Image (cartoon, rainbow, N blue to C red):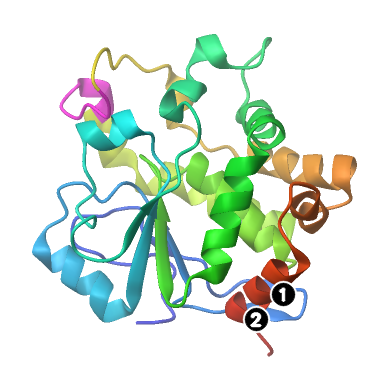
Amino acid sequence: MKNLKRLPVPGLSNCRDLGGYAAKNGATRYGVFLRSEAPCGLPQAGIDWLRDYGVTETFDLRSEEEIRWRPSGLAQAMPYRQISLSGGAETFEKKNLPQGEFSWDKVYIKRAREHGDWVREAVTACAEAEGCVLFHCTTGKDRTGILTCCLLGAVGVSREDIAADYCLSQVYLQDMFAAMRSGSLTIRQGASNFEEYVFRTPFTAMMKFYDFFTEEYGGVREYLLHIGVTEETLARLETKLVESV
């Protein structure tokens, strides 16, 4: 069970383990970091499954408004921490996006530039956590994808593997996307009419996002140091996430 990528958690369709990727000094361990969509309305079987898998803590990347509208099913079940990106999902609405033709890489780059404090807090919290951490936003692809890129990139996972991991959300979230399109699932209070780009995770977006770190900072690790993540934190992250092979 510990060597599965997509985890069959009752109540979740996009829950994945970040283990099994070649890294600079080995390979990423299974059972350290899980990414998923928001575990809202999670049945007891889902909570029990995650506990049995070894999850000891959960980080919620959503905004206060999103959390009030759809509370996490894990908030009362285990240690729970909010690490909200300022503005939440609203920062991904068209009126707040970079000008010109839409592409997700522009959005992620803008967030990395403007919200280094959020990235620093999230990466540091992941590195300092004692057990297995599940982190999520609403769909588990955008804010979750940014954090995943930073964690995997910091330990030397390739841009191709990071992009491949990112792309999987578009496949696994089809039922959730259908519910969002039809209005049977509302992810926040108010209007829920979504542009089609909301439902896409093109590999080019994550490849270009990774390239942004390389071109402007020299790499993901160098970006993290630039925004205030310490060398000690990065060393702890590597010890926690990477095993020699």
Query: Would you name the residue on which mark 1 appears?
Result: 235
Q: Nearer the viewer, residue 195 or 32?
A: 32
The kind of residue on which mark 2 rests is Thr
Above-or-below relation of 26 to 172: below
Query: Would you name the residue on which mark 2 appears?
Result: 239
Residue 164 appearing in the image: no
Horizontal side of residue 91 vs 106, given as left or right: left
| Alpha-carbon span between mark 1 and mark 2 | 6 Å
Q: Locate residue 49, reporting x and y percent.
A: 21, 72
Above-or-below relation of 217 to 194: below
Seen at 61% across and 46% down, the residue is 119
Residue furthest left in the image: 44
Q: Name the quadrant of the C terminus.
A: bottom right
Q: Quadrant of residue 162?
A: bottom right
Above-or-below relation of 139 to 79: above
Seen at 33% across and 79% down, the residue is 54
Q: Dot 1: within a 10 Å radius of its alpha carbon, few (fewer than 14), some, or many (20 or more) residues?
A: some
Q: Locate residue 18, reporting x and y percent.
A: 52, 67
Contact (Cβ within 8 Å) of mark 1 with mark 2: yes
Residue at disc 1, secondary structure: helix
Q: Which residues are magenta?
A: 180-188
Seen at 28% across and 17% down, the residue is 192
Residue 31 falls within the magenta-colored stretch: no
Residue 24 appearing in the image: yes
Q: Name the quadrant of the N terminus.
A: bottom left
Q: Locate residue 24, reporting x and y percent.
A: 77, 74
Seen at 63% across and 71% down, the residue is 237
The kind of residue on which mark 1 rests is Ala
